[in-house]
Image (cartoon, rainbow, N blue to C red):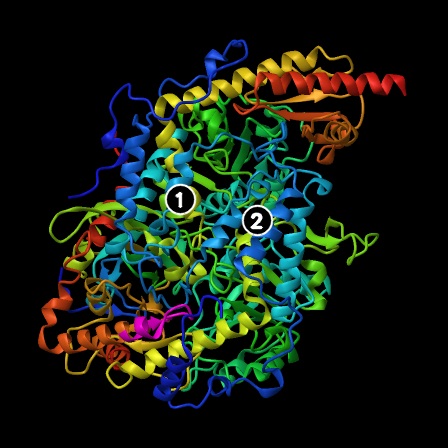
Amino acid sequence: MVYIPHTDAERQEMLAAIGVNNLDALFQDIPEKFRYPQLDLPAPLSEMEILQELQFLAALNVNANVVPTFLGAGAYRHWVPSVVDYVISRGEFYTAYTPYQAEVSQGTLQAIFEYESMICDLTGMDVANASHYDGATATAEAVIQAYNVFRKKRAKVVIAPTVHPHYRQVVHTYTQGMGLDIVGGDDPMMPLEQLIALVDENTACLILQTPDFLGRLVNLEGIAEQVHARGKGTLLAVVVNPISLGLLKPPGAYGADIVLGEGQPLGLGLNFGGPYLGFYATRDEYVRQMAGRLVGKTVDVEGKDGYVMTLTTREQHIRRDKATSNICSNEGLMALAATVYMAALGKHGLRKIAELNYHKAHYAADVIDKIPGFSVVKTHPFFNEFMVRCPAQVADINHFLLNDIEEVEIVGGYDLGRDYPGLQRHMLVAVTEVNSRHEIDLFAEALGAFTAEEQEA
Amino acid sequence: MNRNTGIRYQETHEWAWQDDDEIVVGITDYAQSTLSDIVYVELPEVGETFARGEQFGVVESVKAAADVYMPMSGKIVAVNEELEDRPELINEDAFGRGWMIRISPTNMAEWKELLDINGYKKVIEEESAH
Amino acid sequence: MSEPLIYELSAPGREGVKPPQLDVPESPLPTAMLREELPLPEVSEVDVVRHYLRLSQLNYAIDKGMYPLGSCTMKFNPKVNEVAARLGGFTGAHPWLDPEAVQGALYIMYSVQEYLKEIGGFAAVSLQPAAGAHGELTGVLIMRKYHLDRGDTARDTILVPDSAHGTNPASSSMSGLRVVEIPSDARGNIDLKALRAQVCERVVGLMFTNPNTLGLFEEHTEEVADIIHSCGGLVYGDGANLNALAGIMRPGDAGIDVMHFNLHKTFSTPHGGGGPGSGPVGVAAHLADYLPAPIVALDPDSSPEEDPYFIFYDPPKSIGRVRAFWGQFGIIVRAYTYMRMLGKEGLRQAAEHAVLNANYLLSRIKGVYPLPYDRICKHEFVVEGRFKDAPDIHALDIAKRLIDYGVHPPTNYFPLIVPEALMIEPTETESKQSLDNYADILLKIAAEARENPHLLHEAPHNAPVRRLDEVRAARNPVLRYAH
């Protein structure tokens, strides 16, 4: 038997102690007609066999650790320092539960406290929770927080059409029973002023993203003031790429009320979309409307410093139907990974990584812009992702890049036409510190080869 | 203030006390001792109006949160702002410095429907029996 | 000695791990947008390793010993799962890749969907939800939309037993629905009389856990489902306790319309100190079209036996997506590995031994710790952590004293319907020796409660910290490092 340590003799002894003859006797309360169904499941495998199969399956996927990749759009290939996986592989961390017994969970609790502190530092905010599932669900929780701040009396929410499409969809899913009016449309070229003009006194919050889904940096100067004034207190929530904050002034410094985003770039693998990390920070005055766990510092009976989960009356296990959210399990281990990542790179390293992203992306934009048929959209400043006008459907170009070049596979950028009908033939190209100059040149060359082949055909 | 005369209760453990035309409201000593150390009090805004029985605030300990309900319909004319920094006042002096709100009542007839001390004692006895 | 915060180890100018060199020309930075300071720590890689290693040593974990948190299913987390999830072809798979480039990943997701359908008795499964509570929200939204689509618009109520996890009522109210609580009867089942009294055309459905949070099998499962169905409502099964039933009974067979699975409970994936989990949702045929989009499907043009090809499929009446991308893929790989290792027989054996272990441990402490519902339990049981002849002792004191003996306390003060509850779930991966050790400690503590109560009141004595001042933490919250 797998992972069951009992010997036959022990099993008999235990059954006797309980006062039954066999295991079946423990299940007599289950109606007989349902008991022991014939399940169509495969036979057991040994560890060796399952790993052989998994190696085979893993090899069927295109692996961004090996293949030059220019795909981002919410999930990014970054270098992960070895120390990150070392720490999150410690059994003391990854096989622990939620730190309900504080005295034997100080490792987890202090790490979360450090995580909360670093997220505050990165975003320029007062207080951060212990994480949400991902950037999308964090965005939905921002809407709910704002709704609760106004005691459910403001039913309108403005979301920029350039917030990640999945995030906007999740906001709609989460709030479908709340009767909210969610506006903002889906024209990515809508000017920011028009969006702000949608804010009124019935608006709970406005949500922006920077860099936005098209890679463009939004100038946040004065936005919070306008939103607060127009909506008499309407909250400004900003979705942000955490790596960009190594370089750029954080939304907190511009007066944002909630700052959140996808923490995957902070030391997590691509993992085909999960587990990721929703980071979330707000201002002190809203801490009681914020969802999620919080760890605070205190002392023990001898006056020694220690950490506990606190302000838990906001949470489902106490407030039940009146809780700020139903969230229970979060992304604890991923938050630990992000903490170790930020600590290991530190003040200087994260800035350096952000600069590498910036310079490499701009270099890539320069070389791609010179390729016949391709032009970079340069209306806004950008960080590590930018939009390229293409001579053909992006799907066709990507197919060519992955399959039709001799001796190399390249993963091209994201097809913006999937989400925005007006952006057919627009590719969103992501460049991080992992893309070497050689890879970038290869990519540009391959795009050139595509154009050449098109012209021949 | 004289705490023994003119004080009324409701089953959800609020007390109410008449002070001229206004009603002062808090939670009872029994309620505070059941909750134990109070760490946070959420109060309404001055000027808000509530019907009798509507929730006007929350009193929280570390592991519990209790909603607090209006004993009478009316408008909030004052809240005990001291509770924001010193929620423990409710533990220390539930009927005095731990008061929560002051109401201008819209229907004085509701006063008579509240429990007197004997009626409230029965409520406590029943709850303690569980 | 306390471990300092990582910030307190910082020295101005110290560098951490070394980023790569810039190999392209610099471009002008957007000067107006640059941040002035980034107040992160300045520490070396050695500092980081030692700090987090020391922190790890302040934790208790399954890898250290028995961790019988009721309702949480702290079973052994197999190490092969970790190796599997870290294969480069999985960690390096970008979620936006075209399906043709991720057939290995889609094969695993499809297989896990199929296995869960089979284990749960459902027609379709979505792997999208990131945790149990997330699965609940998904399930409740599915139930809500099902009624609305049928023009049944007056339904606004979810019925929840009083023994339910707090996430059940919270998920319901997040979905905009009213919650009505149903009491339990003297045997720990749902009180059928009370249930019938609440059944009406306002009912969206009932959420219930089976075995329930008392560790007891709901003896009227079918009847409960029939009562709810008779008013047009749906039955939501909270699958948190499926580890007692996997391979033994399929919830879908007994009238459950929708249920979430906790891969981090039943299927051995680690809890990570609070997450990530994974909470797939299974539904009966009439709800299949409402699952979150997309799910993984077999391309109808491909041959399932010889050359299967997997695609994403959007259910036509979907409630929408509940997260970005496709699911907790790294967790799903671990669960897949576990299911393949166990196979059909292993799954049933795991449930049988989980139940054996719980009943055995119960038999060892019965008579000493008051037992509110005396029945054969399933994977866990609930006793009272109080003694008539030791009136000052509370469940909390017992829990803290267990720490002194080097084991982890059970869940306490839940479920809410048992006073001073101690909820104990040993799981199947504990040996008889381990259970005997735990029982011996519990018995010893019961004796101490009478003879030396201060040992309990002041416990823990030898943990990294003593009891912490939670009142102070809540009254004057310190939620971040102050620079």
Q: Where residue C120 sits in the image (x, y, percent)?
A: 61, 69
Residue that lies at the very extreme toward the right in this rendered image: A457
**Marks 2 and 1: CB-CB under 8 Å?**
no
Q: Which amino acid does label 1 sit on?
A: Ile
User: Is residue B7 or residue A23 the one in the foreground?
Assistant: A23
- Residue C258 image position (x, y, % from top left): 61, 67
Q: How far apart are marks 2 and 1 (CA)?
A: 17 Å
Q: Which circle marks residue A88 in the picture?
A: 1
Q: Position of residue A434 (x, y in %)?
A: 54, 25
Residue closer to the observer: C476 or A97: A97
* Residue segment shown in magenta: C423-436
User: Which residue carries the number 2 mark?
Assistant: C329
Tell me: C409 left or right of B106. left
Instruction: Give above or below for C87 relative to A377.
Output: below
Which mark, by number, is residue A193? none
| Foreground of the two, A205 or B43 | A205
Q: Report the chain holding disc 1.
A: A
Q: Please report, as a chain letter, where disc 2 is located.
A: C
Neighbourhood count class around disc 2 (C-alpha, 10 Å): few under 14, some 14–19, many 20 upward:
many
Q: Is mark 2 on a helix, strand or loop?
A: helix
Residue found at x 90% / y 21%: A457
Say if the magenta span includes residue A109.
no
Identify the secondary structure beneath mark 1.
Answer: helix
- Horizontal side of C407 relative to A133 (left or right) equals left
Amino acid residing under circle 2: Phe
Q: How many marks?
A: 2
Q: Are marks 2 and 1 on the same chain?
A: no
